[in-house]
Amino acid sequence: MLQIGDEVYFSAVFLLVLFGTRSAIGASAVTASIYVFIVMFRFPQVPADQASQVLRPTGLASAGVPVVAHRAGGHDAPENTIAAIREASRNGATGVELDLGFTADGVAVLMHDETVDRTTNGTGAVGTLRLAELRTLDATGKHRLREKFKGERVPTLQEAVEECINHQLTIFFDVKDQPDQAAAALGEMYRKHPVLYNSSIVCSFQPKLIYKMRQADPGVVTALTHRPWSLSRYGDGTPRSLSAWTNYWLGVLDVLLDWAHHHLLWNLCGVSAILMQKDFISLDYVQYWAERGVEVVGWTINTAVDKQFYQDVLKISYITDSLREDCEPHY
């Protein structure tokens, strides 16, 4: 069902179309069409108790909040590796966020970037390397603790999932592209390991990927990842374009995208959580989503002061690059 209060936004759509077309009939038709589209094609959220098991797992201290290691804790160990998963577990993480990539021979592996250049001692696009070639690379190649973890390899999705299950870690699967391949690979994991339905969540910046996942398996807990102004600015705030005109129109698209995330896309996809960049989270923001049955998870929280704020004031989950010390953010 649509949420109480959404009539305000449908009224706004009606008035906007009415202003543009000067036609009450046309405005009514457009507004009604949007409403019917959502009702007919939306996916309902998974049951609240299932989402709670994933997002608020039992076993936490009474005042504790879930802590998720970003890229399995890329500051404390080489990111997206088995070593990082083990280190995150030792350091007290509730869960790990893992990035999904695919080799040239279609094997799902853990890799954040499109290339292996930044995180290994190799070069080239992940999608052009076969698994056997990827296995020859050292995944600690450029990490600050490479001597401690020397020889760590890029793991397959299967290996990473089994390691997380062994450590009873919640998994945040981050999917960036290739929706059909991702849905198939993750679907296989859920069939092999049914425990994942209550211990994992599929996340993406791209709503179409989440919608595709819900189509493939409506029983999977999902989340939209979002950062306002992401089309016009990089994570550090730097404009994406040197052209003021281009930035202006990208800014307009940012406003529309932000509105869609908060009033349309979450409902259409039936997500249980929204992963929001930390600078845009407040108590009011958390309450807004709580009224819609959606959990807020903040990223990336890398200082002790911010972590204390999430624990004591916001009382929501957060994603961090390190469970051991303050560090610079990874966007």
Image (cartoon, rainbow, N blue to C red):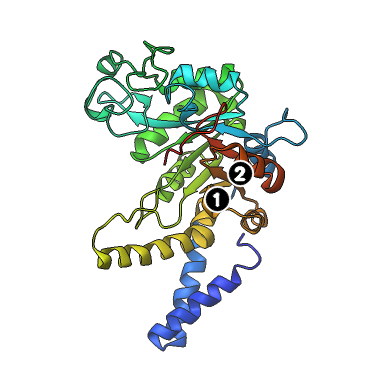
- The amino acid sitting under disc 2 is Val
Alpha carbons under labels 2 and 1: distance apart = 8 Å
Task: Classify 10 Å Cα crowding around label 2: few (below 14), some (14-19), many (20 and above).
Answer: some
* Residue closer to the observer: 76 or 180: 76
**134 displayed left or right of 169:** left
Instruction: Specify whether residue 274 is in view.
Output: yes
Identify the residue shown where x is 63% and y is 38%: 55
Classify mark 1: helix, strand or loop: loop
Identify the residue shown where x is 39% and y is 34%: 182
Disc 2 and disc 1 in contact, CB within 8 angstroms: yes
* Residue closer to the observer: 246 or 26: 246
Image coords of residue 11 (percent x, y) = 55, 77
Which residue carries the number 1 mark? 270
Which residue carries the number 2 mark? 46
In the orientation shown, which residue stands out farthest toward the bottom?
Answer: 22
Identify the residue shown where x is 66% and y is 40%: 308
**238 displayed left or right of 296:** left
Above or below, comparing residue 170 to residue 298 in the picture: above
- The amino acid sitting under disc 1 is Gly
Who comes first in sequence, dot 2 or dot 1? 2
**48 displayed left or right of 121:** right
Image coords of residue 135 (percent x, y) = 31, 14
Above or below, comparing residue 41 to residue 181 in the picture: below
Quarter of the view holding residue 289: bottom right
Classify mark 2: helix, strand or loop: loop
